[in-house]
Image (spheres, rainbow, N blue to C red):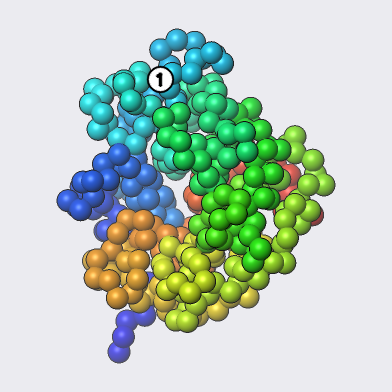
Amino acid sequence: MEDDSFRRDLHEQYFNWMLLELPGAYESEEVNRLTFAYFAISALDILDSLDHVSVEDTIAWVYGLQVLPQTEVGEGNNETTYGFRGSPSVGISFQGHGAHPTAHDGGHLAMTYSALAVLAILGDDYSRVSRDAIVSSIRKLQQSDGSFSPSLIDKQSDMRFLFCAVAISVMLDDWNGVDRNKAVNFIVRSQSFDGGFGLSPGLEAHGGATYCALAALRLITLYDSSWPSSATLASLIDVDRAMKWCMNRQAEGGGFQGRPNKPADTCYAFWLGGSLRMFEIDHLCNHEQLRKFLISAQRKWGGFSKFPQEDLPDLLHSYYGICGFSLLGEPGLKPLAFELGITQRTANRLPGFGPKRTQKTAFD
């Protein structure tokens, strides 16, 4: 008989392995090491299995990747992006609070999001985070169309980094780096004719971009206390078309696809499962078939592959596979604050997210 059980023990083992040593195949991704740490640590948090994580050492390592300003932060200081770098690969020496930037070096929005998520999961109070420098950098990274670039030396700008900027603002409980009107306008203009959202206006709708758009809108409308209470999701976007587009992404075999006519992929159990949860209609998708799909992508070493027919797991799809099972209500898994990409218990410790905020829904 085919085993259809969720192998919690193997997944715990897999993510603990990944924290100790990444396989050689990840060598070319060294600059993303901080995000890999986020995948592993957040997965272990969902699994309620952080026992083997060296908390103090990990927190010290994360702070060692902080990019610190050399002078007082001000609007005229435009030479670099502050926040967190993805790894020490530029040759910086370890310093407990972080290091000043070197040539062609600086913080990155996605890495800063990953760093703040890891620190929050491990119970850090952000007392060593250079908050003003990060907020100042976020302000400089917002483009005239409302989108964000990840760093001052990277000219791409799209929905991914807009989500990171908004999520960081919630984590730090400081919205001074984001022009919310411009950001919301960018999101609204990125809704495609078919209802989903592209990475930028006029681009094809995509499951990951749709999650980033909806999550950013939800965070702004629910957790920014200065945002007008009348400006809800329902008043900003075509909700009916967006819901229909998301529902139609559940493909043959039970998994979710990122775009029409694409095969189902493990990570979209989170990107689209989370989007449906934001619309409060996730109960309408076929949970049984989605679970079967995820089980088929579960590997015998622990973790998940992108497609069921692949032999080896990878960290990204393994993490989002765990997230997918959390959204399905798998027993023993911690529930997600799906709009932030961390567990609800971790999110509730953040001053910008916890129960003190408004209890209205995104549609009120």
Camera-side residue of 71 and 193:
193
Which residue, given by chain and number where applicable, does mark 1 sit on?
A: 68
Image x and y of residue 221, in percent = 71, 45
| Left or right: 359 as drawn, with respect to 271 | right
| Left or right: 235 as drawn, with respect to 296 | right
Q: Residue at x 49, y 61 (%)?
A: 270
Residue type for callout 1: Leu
Of the 4 image quadrants, the one containing the N terminus is bottom left
In this rendering, the answer to whether 360 lies above or below 322 is: above
Q: Residue at x 27, y 71 (%)?
A: 310
Image x and y of residue 206, in percent = 53, 60
In this rendering, the answer to whether 294 lies above or below 39 is: below
Camera-side residue of 348 and 25:
25
Q: Residue at x 78, y 47 (%)?
A: 231
In this rendering, the answer to whether 291 lies above or below 208 is: below
Furthest-left residue in this view: 24
Image x and y of residue 284, in percent = 63, 75
| Left or right: 287 as drawn, with respect to 245 | left
Please tell me how many numbered marks the rendered image carries: 1
Using the rendered image of the protein, determine whether residue 355 is visible from the camera's viewpoint. Answer: no
Secondary element type, mark 1: loop
Q: Residue at x 64, y 66 (%)?
A: 194
Furthest-front residue in this view: 202
Furthest-right residue in this view: 230
Of the 4 image quadrants, the one containing the C terminus is bottom right
* Label 1: how many Cα within 10 Å (few below 14, some 14–19, many 20+): many
Using the rendered image of the protein, determine whether residue 85 is visible from the camera's viewpoint. Answer: yes
Furthest-bottom residue in this view: 1
Image x and y of residue 207, in percent = 52, 61
